[in-house]
Amino acid sequence: MSVLSTLPAGTYNIDPSHSRVGFSARHAMVTKVRGSFNEYSGSATVADGAASLNIDITVSSVDTRSADRDGHLQSADFFDAVTFPKITFASTSVKDSGSDKLVVDGNLTIKDVTKPISITFEYTGTATDPFGNARFGFEGEAEINRKDYGLTWNAALETGGILVSENIKLEFEISTIAAK
């Protein structure tokens, strides 16, 4: 099935109260720490079998369920939220890849460093909510190396290895609402 041919032409806004933009990283080489950003906005536009996607994320909204860790992530050791308050993603192409999947290529900018990434999204369905809003759902993920974006802080472990993994999984659970 072609996802792009399923979606009516128009603009769709990300509904942050029913979506999640998150990440996971290995901690101390033994477990994963998950986090999310609680403030973000974005939209997708579909027209003539083509699409685009843009997301703006507020760095200071990082939430890993640990105030100390969140503060460290916001500091100059990591995101430097005072100097670089936003993370952005802007698509350069959106392609159907069959089986209800879209491959969204685009530019991810963290700390004024822009690199191309590819996010594979699974189309999870369409529904009309009780308020008459047309909703479209997508779940996606991508992996980046945080050092590529200037996120280089780390600590060596006595047992060998490092405290925070270089590879970070980005996680997107998106509900969009057709703009009115």
Image: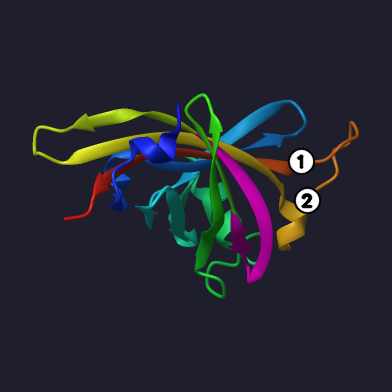
Q: Position of residue 99 (x, y in %)?
A: 51, 24
Left of 65 or right of it: where is 12? left
| 122 vs 64: above or below | above
Residue 88 position in % (x across, y down)? 52, 62
Can residue 112 be seen from the camera position used here? yes
- Relative to 144, say whether 72 is above or below: below
Q: Which residue is mark 1?
A: 163
Q: Of label 1 and label 2, which has the lower sequence position?
A: 2
Whether 114 is among the magenta residues is yes
The answer to whether residue 166 is left or right of residue 159 is left
Position of residue 143 in the picture relative to residue 48 (left or right) = right
Residue at (20%, 39%) from the top-left corner?
134
Q: Secondary structure at mark 1?
A: loop
Residue that label 2 marks: 154
Q: Is residue 78 covered in magenta?
A: no
* Residue at 42% in and 47% down: 49
Crowdedness of circle 1 by 10 Å Cα count: few (<14), some, many (20+)?
Answer: some
Q: Amino acid at mark 2?
A: Asn
Q: Residue lying furthest left in this view?
A: 131
Main SS, magenta residues: strand
Residue 153 in view in this figure: no
Q: Nearer the viewer, residue 102 or 26?
A: 102
The x, y position of residue 59, in whole percent, is 49, 60
Q: Which residues are magenta?
A: 106-121
Q: Determine contact: label 1, label 2, CB under 8 Å.
A: yes
Q: Is residue 39 above or below residue 5?
A: below
Q: Position of residue 148 (x, y in %)?
A: 76, 58
